[in-house]
Image: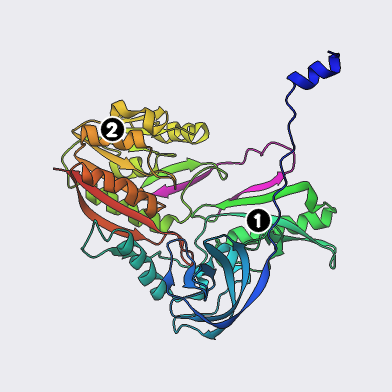
Amino acid sequence: MSIFEKRKKYVKIYKMPRRRKKFKQKEIILDSPLIIEKLTPTGQGIGTLSDGKKIFLWNTLPNEEVKSFIQIKSKSSYDEGIAKDFVKTSEYRTEPKDEQYLSTSPWQIMTDDYEADQKTAVIKELFRNLWQDEVAFHQSPDTWHYRNKMEYSLYYNFASEKIELAIHPRGSHSKMPIKTSSIERAEIFEKAEAIIKQLNESGDEAKNYSSLLLRCNQNGDVEGGLFEKRKPHPVFNNLTDEILGKTYSYSPNGFFQINLPIYEIALTRIKEILDTTETKKVIDLYSGVGTIGLSTAGEKELTLVEVDKSAYKELEANCKDIETATPVLAKSEEALEYIAPDSVVILDPPRAGCDKKLIDKLIEVKPKKIIYLSCNPITQVRDIELLISAGAKLKSVEAFNFFPHTPHIENLVSLDFA
């Protein structure tokens, strides 16, 4: 057998994977109006096409009748799209402030009161088997210009031969230039425009940068800057903010709450819940830079667990002058030894919810109280159902509008183990 034949026998031949075909968007004109049944927790309106297939449409409200839409995704069991023309529109529909609203804040199409009703209805529906009392809804003090962090794309306009701020249109990888924006603080947009002006005056090119990130504190100080392609992210100057009397330091490109005024309202509620128990031991899991635990339980025996090294560095600094606070660098599901029967456990996990190992430990130990703040009520309900099945009692459910004019809801619950 020749060397070539031996190689052919023993060497596995790999075929190159097929490149996935890019979905081509198209306008669909309906034979009969599509009625929007309700809004989903993800923010789209849902309807049923004439062939029985479900469709999820942005730019729709309940009871509206859609004449045509732009199809942006098609699966065997459902379609996704953006409503274009209507036969009938809702009395609660309003004119959006921003041209790019579908990408940044798709619920600009409804009134503030209607948004509050819809978000409350979403929580009631998710918790329908767990909670029969009213759900409190806490509105953001500011519903426009509330974001303290924004990341923009850069776009080169060949007509004007200038760089412009841009975002990605929903359902597309292209770029859309923006002239105004109503969701971030005005200081951020002003700084962004100034940076773009400098780039144009210097003759720089948009292709050299992946994005522009800026953050602003409550005093209006703005930090951040451009991310250059193929280069490490720069280290920006830290910002500081005061939350419930405690000053925090944080990085502009690290994790910190986007809407501080409504966050303070949520923290005040957490402190009120904490004050209903006499226990002095509090474990703050998924603690970030420590704003929940240190703002609400700084005088107690407080353990704060965080896995991200950058956030942990900030957490250590924020704990520096508090003798009762102990920061721990670890995954929350690997710091289970700190959970005790006489403790209160604070949870603020990412959108995926709590790790199963952590839920199992809470069920095993049965701490006095669990306070669970979630940015994804869908996974929150999943976790709470497990705790309730093990004997926990749900004591409160309340929603907070951290992100006005978007479908996102921050939901706070408390549970006791009897």
Of tags 1 and 2, the one toward the viewer is 2
Decide if residue 224 is on the left or right side of residue 363: right
Decide if residue 101 is on the left or right side of residue 247: right
- Seen from the viewer's position, the closer of residues 169 and 71 is 71
Which amino acid is tagged 2?
A: Lys
Horizontal and vertical percent position of residue 10: 74, 19
Q: Residues within 10 Å of mark 2 (few under 14, many from 20)?
A: some
The structure residue drawn at horizontal position 29% and vertical position 26%, both measured from the top left corner, is 337
Which residue is tagged 1? 152
Give the number of the disc on residue 361. Answer: 2
Decide if residue 244 is in sight here: no
Decide if residue 149 is on the left or right side of residue 293: right
Coloration mode: rainbow
Q: Does label 1 or label 2 sit earlier along the sequence?
A: 1
Total marks in image: 2
Tell whether position 323 is magenta.
no
Q: Quadrant of the N terminus?
A: top right
The residue positioned farthest toward the bottom in the image shown: 87
The structure residue drawn at horizontal position 55% and vertical position 61%, both measured from the top left corner, is 185
Which amino acid is tagged 1?
A: Tyr
**Whole-number angstrom distance, CA of label 1 to CA of label 2:** 41 Å
Give, as a single range, the part of the protein colored magenta. 221-243
Does dot 1 land on a helix, a strand or a loop? strand
Q: Residues within 10 Å of mark 1 (few under 14, many from 20)?
A: many
Horizontal and vertical percent position of residue 94: 50, 80
Tell whether position 242 is magenta.
yes
The residue positioned farthest toward the front in the image shown: 1
Image vertical order of residue 275 relative to residue 178, above or below: above
The structure residue drawn at horizontal position 40% and vertical position 31%, both measured from the top left corner, is 320
Residue contact between numbered discs 1 and 2, judged by CB atoms under 8 Å: no
Give the number of the disc on residue 214. Answer: none
- Seen from the viewer's position, the closer of residues 151 and 44 is 44
